Amino acid sequence: MILELLNLAWIFFKIGLFTFGGGYAMIPLMESELVGRGLIDVNMLYDFIGIAESTPGPIAINMATFIGNEAMVQYGFLARILGSIVMTTAVALPSFIIILLIASLGSQFLESRLVKEAFKGLKPTVIGLILSVSIGLMIRLIFPMISFKELVFDWSVFQFHNLVIFLILVLLSIRIKKISPIKMILIGAVLGMIIYSTF
Amino acid sequence: MKKPHHLLELFWVFFKIGAMTFGGGLAMMPIMRREVVETKGWVNDDDILKILVISESTPGVFAVNAATFIGYKIQGFMGALVSTLGVIIPSLITISIISFFILQFKSLILVQYAFYGIQAAVALLIFKAALKLSKKIHFDAFAWIVLLSSILFATFTQINVLWLLLVGALLGIIYGMIEQIKGAKS
């Protein structure tokens, strides 16, 4: 159990260390580090993200708490609490250390040319990663048997319900520019219940 | 600038900020500013601006960055620690409670339906977040090439995302060097 805990903590430490550009930038990392290694199921990841988005608190912290709890599920109540605490600490630690160094030593290092240039390459990379994850999720919702990564192209399974829900959400977000994430998720949930129970 | 009477006061202010923010990140900034600048007068707008700029060029969880930085400005290391704990603990409590009930909850068929819709909303939100981030960068040929390669490699290969990030950073540095050599020649 301890080994599992440390292993997962190391993954969350890496996620905290390599997240540039806010909570959403963490999702590609989580998909590759957690789903890619078979630690959680891809549907569970996105269900969690939906919940993390609609509960108070930073998404990254919410996700770490969730997955820490879930990963220790077979070891009982206390282990699950411990899992949450350890993962939350692990994901927050890189930020804490880096900002503490900057706050006490100054931020001159950030103004160096090298850092600026690295960010010129990092920013488009991060945007590409986030786009890729969202497109992957959209395709998986509509054609669940498609996997670009494993080169499986089975177009026969087609989730019409999900397509309808998705199109309504797209139309809504075009019509209402300033729709908050939590409202979007609530509308999604209601649409899911209505469309799946009626058709 | 004023100081908090007690570390607990600092903790409580950041606890409230953590408990009131949905979505985290920048959404937290107006609430944090109101609490620590306007109501308490512990730091000034300059400090708020500084942490925004620093967060642009450091990795990590934005809420933790902000709490650590502002906490440090107010009360040194202990301030940073207490503020960070304050901003994290509401999540830890709320999500732990939800985690213990989620499985029973998800066995209801209507809840499963809801989650199909939630995933569709999440897909759209992630997509919109990428668009929003892209407004913050200047798109020259270099940025386009990096962006498109990043999408292609992330979608069609199993290369670890961490490697893609490292390569992206390296490409930025190499491109900067090329630009500089070109600049020196002309």
Image: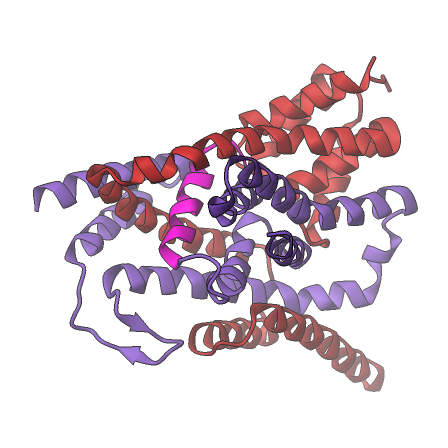
- At 30% from the left and 40% from the top, the residue drawn is B106
Q: Is residue B181 visible?
A: yes
**Which residue reaches farthest left?**
A199
Q: Colour of chain B?
A: red
Figure check: A172 above or below A26? above
Q: In x, y percent, where is residue A75?
A: 51, 44
Q: How is the image coloured?
A: by chain
Figure check: B150 above or below A79? below
In the image, which residues are magenta?
A42-58
Q: Colour of chain A?
A: purple
Residue A44 painted magenta: yes
A146 on left or right of B45: left
Q: Is residue B61 visible?
A: no
- At 80% from the left and 20% from the top, the residue drawn is B7
**Which residue reaches farthest bottom?**
B185
B57 on left or right of A159: right
Closest to the observer: B48 or A34?
A34
Residue A174 painted magenta: no
